[in-house]
Image: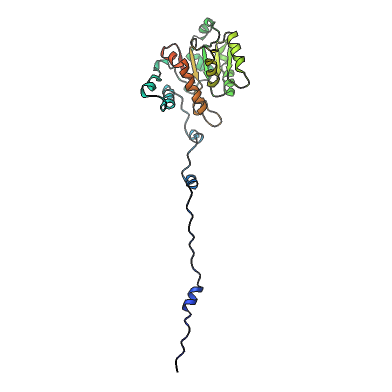
């Protein structure tokens, strides 16, 4: 009599046991990889953590070099370099605009009285916006005295009106943005030869903590304006530059 063999339940029991499941992770796309990379800090974040540092002549020199480095040869870049003698003492962050102008233009009253040429100014203050220009005009009251001041920006003021005013009367001080000033010079409505002092509103920061030269459009317009005769006037020592 053959002995009955018991059924082997081992295989069936193993089949019933839960198995560990491994899911294959899908490969990341280029877009997802880019997102996981370290985020580049915005200029606002960088400036928020940095201590206020007054502008220096070398900052303007470096600005010109950086802007034109990919457009000019080494020799041409060297020609853009300004002599140290054309720079006035920079604002050390303790001055108001009036006190700074008094320091760099101690003989202002005499200079103002001798100025009679139309389509020109003696002092030009360049800033980042129309709103900032109005603030600067209000803050220079103690310096300007009886001087005629002109707004040289585009907001709410047509260029034809500015051209007409420059042709009609003698103006001593101009405050505005580089874009509008550049356009007036281009049209021949504003002559640069009588200009004696050019002041950049260098250290002031807007709500995003940007200085005027941190704004690409302002930086571009400023560099192009400097090449429209201002650099040559500085080299001839008839024009002085100040960083307020």
- Work out whether residue 203 can be spotted: no
- Which of 81/86 is in front? 81
In the current view of this chain or complex, which residue is farthest to the left?
Answer: 75
Question: How far across and how far down the image is residue 131, in percent?
Answer: 59, 23
Question: How far across and how far down the image is residue 141, in percent?
Answer: 58, 15
* Vertical comparison of 176 with 24: above or below: above
Tell me where residue 83 sits by quadrant.
top left
- Work out whether residue 85 can be spotted: yes
Question: How far across and how far down the image is residue 47, in percent?
Answer: 49, 33
Report the coloring of the rendering: rainbow
- Which of 165/43 is in front? 165
Quadrant including the N terminus: bottom left
Q: Is residue 74 left or right of residue 42?
A: left
Tell me where residue 150 sits by quadrant.
top right
In the current view of this chain or complex, which residue is farthest to the bottom?
Answer: 1
Q: Residue at x 36, y 24 (%)?
A: 74
Q: How many marks?
A: 0
- Which of 50/193 is in front? 193
Question: How far across and how far down the image is residue 123, in percent?
Answer: 52, 13
């Amino acid at each position: 009599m053959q002995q009955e063999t018991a059924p082997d339940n081992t295989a069936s029991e193993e089949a019933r046991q839960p198995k560990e499941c491994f899911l294959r992770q899908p490969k990341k796309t280029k877009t997802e990889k880019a997102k996981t990379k370290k985020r580049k800090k915005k200029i606002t974040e960088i400036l928020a953590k940095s201590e206020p540092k007054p502008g220096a002549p070398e900052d303007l020199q470096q600005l010109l070099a950086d802007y034109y480095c990919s457009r000019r040869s080494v020799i041409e870049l060297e020609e853009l370099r300004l002599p140290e003698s054309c720079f006035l003492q920079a604002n050390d962050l303790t001055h108001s605009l009036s006190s700074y102008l008094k320091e760099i233009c101690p003989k202002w009253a005499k200079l103002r009285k001798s100025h009679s040429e139309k389509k020109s100014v003696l002092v030009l203050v360049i800033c980042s916006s129309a709103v900032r220009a109005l603030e600067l005009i209000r803050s220079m009251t103690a310096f300007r005295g009886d001087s005629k001041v002109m707004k040289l920006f585009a907001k709410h003021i047509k260029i034809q009106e500015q051209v007409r005013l420059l042709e009609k009367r003698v103006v001593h001080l101009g405050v505005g943005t580089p874009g509008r000033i550049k356009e007036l010079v281009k049209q021949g409505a504003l002559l640069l030869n009588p200009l004696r002092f050019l002041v950049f509103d260098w250290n002031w920061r807007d709500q995003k903590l940007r200085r005027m030269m941190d704004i690409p459009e302002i930086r571009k317009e400023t560099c192009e304006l400097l090449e429209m005769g201002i650099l040559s006037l500085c080299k001839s020592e008839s024009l002085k530059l100040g960083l307020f």
